[in-house]
Image (cartoon, coloured by chain):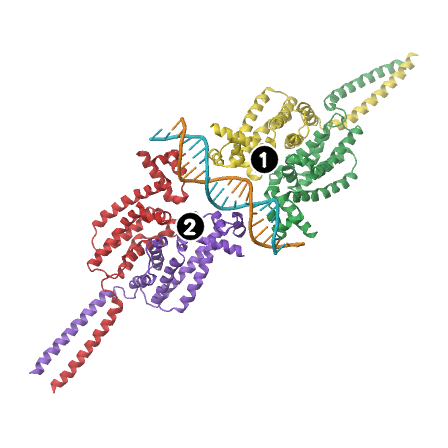
Chain colours: A yellow, B green, C red, D purple, E cyan, F orange
Amino acid sequence: MRRAQEILGAARQIFLEKGFGGASVSEIAAKVGVVEGLVYSYYPTKRDLLNDVLCAMYVPLIRDIEESFSRIQGVRSRLRFLIWRHLRVFVEEPGLSRLVLHEVRTGPEYFQSVLHDLHVRYTTFLVRTLQEAIEQGEIRTDIDIELLRSMVYGGIEHRMWGTLFGRGAVDIESTADQYTQIVLGSLISTPQVSATMAGESANMAQLLQETRDRLDRMAQLVSK
Amino acid sequence: MRRAQEILGAARQIFLEKGFGGASVSEIAAKVGVVEGLVYSYYPTKRDLLNDVLCAMYVPLIRDIEESFSRIQGVRSRLRFLIWRHLRVFVEEPGLSRLVLHEVRTGPEYFQSVLHDLHVRYTTFLVRTLQEAIEQGEIRTDIDIELLRSMVYGGIEHRMWGTLFGRGAVDIESTADQYTQIVLGSLISTPQVSATMAGESANMAQLLQETRDRLDRMAQLVSK
Amino acid sequence: MRRAQEILGAARQIFLEKGFGGASVSEIAAKVGVVEGLVYSYYPTKRDLLNDVLCAMYVPLIRDIEESFSRIQGVRSRLRFLIWRHLRVFVEEPGLSRLVLHEVRTGPEYFQSVLHDLHVRYTTFLVRTLQEAIEQGEIRTDIDIELLRSMVYGGIEHRMWGTLFGRGAVDIESTADQYTQIVLGSLISTPQVSATMAGESANMAQLLQETRDRLDRMAQLVSK
Amino acid sequence: MRRAQEILGAARQIFLEKGFGGASVSEIAAKVGVVEGLVYSYYPTKRDLLNDVLCAMYVPLIRDIEESFSRIQGVRSRLRFLIWRHLRVFVEEPGLSRLVLHEVRTGPEYFQSVLHDLHVRYTTFLVRTLQEAIEQGEIRTDIDIELLRSMVYGGIEHRMWGTLFGRGAVDIESTADQYTQIVLGSLISTPQVSATMAGESANMAQLLQETRDRLDRMAQLVSK
DNA sequence: GATGAATGAGGTTTCATTCAT
DNA sequence: CATGAATGAAACCTCATTCAT
């Protein structure tokens, strides 16, 4: 039992660091200080080991998100939380997303695997948030949720990639703010509002001004 | 010279198909019909070969974008074009992005490589577009361009990933539309416009109405 | 004691199914529901385990044959029984012969082993039958018993080999009949009967003819 | 080319000596004095190597038999030749039959392999001989040729097995004689020949006796 | 009597790379 | 320019066997 944990830990480190292909079982075994063969008595296959590593990371992560998520209300707050939480994954578990995206999601067999289920559960919070917002009329209905999901997770991953190699640091608080702002900014209920309303607004303001001018002139006239 | 080209072509095919790790030099050589050793007289290393392959793809791609880009004006149009063009890469060269993202951008040495430069040049169009828009006051100034860049490219990549394995097809025209809409929706100059403007607009309309009423009453008064 | 039996039983199944090389101690242990290590507290070595398995099969087999054999009289009946019994082994214990022939009888150390003794005892019935037949003048004396033993057992094994993989079924009754017929057909007492008897027969006929001729001539002489 | 031959030669030796499972590629490579990997540049797989080894033995063997066989006439001579030739294989290529029988003919996939074809070709001479003999009425028609084939090859293999480990030597000339005698002894056209001929012989003897008696009586008559 | 953790050597196979010709 | 033979290291995985508890 303890050995299994040690191996799992070592595997986690090395997998996250070098990816699946880049890691070797012998390296993992060496890190634990055991013989290669022993690894196979706990995990029948290198890939099984990877699976268990990822499950061991996903499961508590999802549980943690679930708890916080249930205590948060409102589209904006929830969205901000999910973005912020995903950013934190990169800071606290650099490489998890890399692994998941780039080495597990390889080939069509992925879509039947446990990992796929876990990833769906992980991203379900966002999807649920967006769907509820749509149902309650808080955001536009003509939006492709898949697209948004990709933008959030893909965007974050892209943004944080460099930080995995020490290229620049990211302030996750302000990044989360901005991210939320951008995503939500385009989602509020009135479609096309920004473009047309700005025009209308300008027109109206001008009209108002003219009217007031006329009023003033007339007042002057009258006051005489 | 022609041999170098043949090898490059074969390498391109196989790298795109199987990735860097999945390809073997012998396979590439076999495709050309030469011996493994000959490959090394043109390209000192497997990785150098990959580099050259990618350069050979990036350079015309960038040139192509450059041309079209220079003929397009306006933030929205340019943004839409860049998004659409990147989507097209996934459709026309599935595997290029896979390669770039998941096998080249691995490890810190990437950031000193030629590939990094090329990628910067590739994404510079977007950065330039956004900067000009900011300078001309078309979009908000409080936006992190890096963040946007990641959202665009990361989001697209995330979205299209599944399609590389035949999981669902994506209509790049409508996707480009939506993408542009979402990205731009949150960028127009007046922050918070959507939420407040509706209120302001109502206020203004009411104000205008009151003003006109006042004007009418005054006119009646005067006319007497 | 009971554990030893359980292990022996599991080992028997797996050895017969997969052969010595194809079986693994861990598999055997797993079948019993114990740990690999426990197997070694009963059987010092994998090969020892195999030995015991085979002994446990040979001993009752030999006893069974002994009983029936003692109740059967006559060369033909006994021979037919031994052939038929050996054929039955292939049907009832497919894999025993495979094991014995192809995985035990490997290398010179076999000839000092207990297995060799058992196999000698197993085939002794045939040898004894043939020897008694010779002594009683029922079959030719110029026959190499070893040769016959090989023909019977080797031939049967060769014939039945394919059936172990489902290639064709064999009717052991008619096969036993034919086999007995063939083997015995060439063993009856008059050696070279086919070749020499024809000659003798011719001689005799000629002798007879001459005699009759003489008789005729004499009759003519007398009649005068 | 020469290396391929060297490797083939080494593989032949080791395979014949230790069987397929008992041999290791590293051992073969070591025998040639090359690195393990080089073997795989000539033979893609250990099993392919085995295949080629066996083909390289079978093909000239079959050709050799074909030549001699075509110059030999008569059932007995041909049968004797085929038996003798197979015995010689054991003396000259000890282990070939072991390999073929016990390590290649393992599992049902064998029956689709090239080796199976070769083995069929090898044993075809015997089958053809027996069939022609049947057609020409030289041997009994009620015989199962498969059974005979098994008896000949299986019997020989069984008989010679021990000699592979130095257990006793076999004189292949006399063994071939006896073998032929036994096999053919039971095959001649008149089944139960011994029984009937004995009867005829008795008749003839009685006739002769009667004739002599007549002669004696006549002689007495004359002498008076 | 039984466990389960651990070993160590071995297996087949793949590949980037080198170099004499 | 091109070959092809060769290397050497590493990969994943299997297993008989041992031993402290």
**Do labels 1 and 2 touch, CB within 8 Å?**
no
Q: Is residue C165 above or below residue B177?
A: below
**Residue found at x 35% / y 42%:** C50
Horizontal and vertical percent position of residue A106: 58, 38
Q: Which of B88/A223 is in front?
A: B88
Q: Is residue D17 above or below residue A69?
A: below
Q: Which of A129/D85 is in front?
A: D85
Dot 2 corresponds to which residue?
A: D19
Horizontal and vertical percent position of residue C85: 28, 50
Q: Which residue in the rendered view is the most extreme toward the left?
A: D224
Figure quadrant of the C terminus of chain C? bottom left
Dot 1 corresponds to which residue?
A: A19
Q: In the structure shown, which secondary structural element does the residue marked by tag 2 occupy?
A: helix
Q: Are marks 1 and 2 on the same chain?
A: no
In the displayed structure image, the side of residue C127 where residue A80 appears, left or right: right
Q: Is residue A114 above or below residue C12?
A: above
Horizontal and vertical percent position of residue A22: 58, 37
Figure quadrant of the N terminus of chain C? top left
In the displayed structure image, the side of residue B194 where residue A24 appears, left or right: left
Q: Chain ID for label 1?
A: A
Q: How many C-alpha atoms fall within 10 Å of the one at disc 1: few (<14), some, or many (≥20)?
A: many
Q: In this rendering, does residue A172 appear at all?
A: yes
Q: Quadrant of residue D177?
A: bottom left
Horizontal and vertical percent position of residue C144: 28, 59
Q: Which of B3/D120 is in front?
A: B3
- The kind of residue tagged 2 is Gly
Q: In the structure shown, which secondary structural element does the residue marked by tag 1 occupy?
A: helix
In the displayed structure image, the side of residue A177 where residue A213 appears, left or right: right
